Amino acid sequence: MARSILGKNALKGRGSLSNPAGRFDRTGIEAVDDGWIQEEAPESVATSVQPDRARGVISTNDSPDIGFEQSINPYRGCEHGCIYCYARPSHAYMGLSAGLDFETKLFYKHEAASVLEEELSRPRYVCKPIMLGANTDPYQPVERRLGVTRSILTVLQKCRHPVSIVTKGVLVARDIDILADLARDRLTSVAMSLTTLDPEVKRTLEPRAASPQARLKIIKQLTQAGVPVGVLVAPVVPAITDHETERILEAAADAGATMASYVLLRLPYEVKDLFREWLAQHYPQRANHVMSLVRDARGGRDNDPNFGTRMKGTGPYAQLLRTRFQLATRRLSLNSPRGFSLETHHFRRPGPQSSQLQLEL
């Protein structure tokens, strides 16, 4: 199925400027001005949400540079619209575009709670921490209405199963009652993603995500509730957000974060072209410099997919960033592992009476 290329003007509340064909599509569309009247490009694109049936919800991971073995993604696609999102290419497997489709055509696992209970009740299931937010944000805007993430947390709470969360969504505060209960048994931790403290940069980089100030308030709320919180400075965008690294860490530490990590900008598959479009629109005079720094840290390419180097990069620029981060986290005591190593011995397998739990929409 072909995907259209839209105008190069940013749409309200969207990160991508276009909707290019996925890499598995056999056909494409090229815009040509033939002199006939053309329809005006829309000023906005509405979000559609569809149920996604799944036989299982727990995914396994064997990557050596990711610190978890199991994850759950309540949603496919993400309305936050972050232009840099490394998960964008996953929409190609559904015959959709990594561009606007990824932000506007969302799928939710409406039976996630009951399927999860079934998986946890299997005799061969071995309890290991589950990550929420490994691919798309579990607290993106549609979660307020659908509540899939909360339904999953309710099951994990009942089973006393360890769970870690990565998010940039302030809706995580809604679930403080569950998270605080889990935290008392060292069963949960939260990493708040912070890319920039500049509201204007955030507006184009992460158009529908919460403001940086709102995320800092959530770090404070979670900390006060006894939930271990870390900050994930991700991605670090060369020549756009990299100068903020120390200030982001200081703000997070002041809010109560006790751990920190970072990821250098990754541009896999379709993301590299979408990001270049975004640069040309929002930072035309800086675009070449940004990409030169990216290539410097990626072995001369736009992206380095290799384990061990894909998260932090290589070369002089990457080493400088690594040194700055290490010095700042040491100074701010943002390297305490306490509370982030989750327990598994509290796990209790779901009983027959648990099977009636369903997601109410």
Image (cartoon, helix red, strand yellow):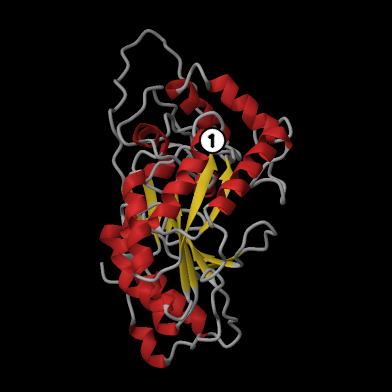
Q: Residue at x 59, y 53 (%)?
A: 330
Q: Tell me the residue that label 1 is attached to.
A: 242
Drawn side of residue 232 relative to residue 65, left or right = left
Which quadrant: the C terminus? bottom left
Question: How many circles with numbers are drawn on the protein?
Answer: 1
Drawn side of residue 324 relative to residue 166, left or right = right
Of 306 and 120, the residue lying toward us: 306
- Residue 51: x %, y % from top left: 36, 60
Of 346 and 7, the residue lying toward us: 346
In the image, residue 329 sits, relative to residue 313, either above or below, namely below
In the image, residue 349 sits, relative to residue 331, either above or below, namely below
**Kind of element beneath mark 1:** helix
Of 259 and 100, the residue lying toward us: 259
Q: Residue at x 50, y 52 (%)?
A: 232
Of 266 and 358, the residue lying toward us: 266
Drawn side of residue 214 relative to residue 230, left or right = left
Q: Amino acid at mark 1?
A: Asp
Residue extending furthest toward the top: 35
- Residue 118: x %, y % from top left: 47, 81
Q: Residue at x 53, y 27 (%)?
A: 276
Whether residue 76 is visible, yes or no, is: no
Residue extending furthest toward the front: 331
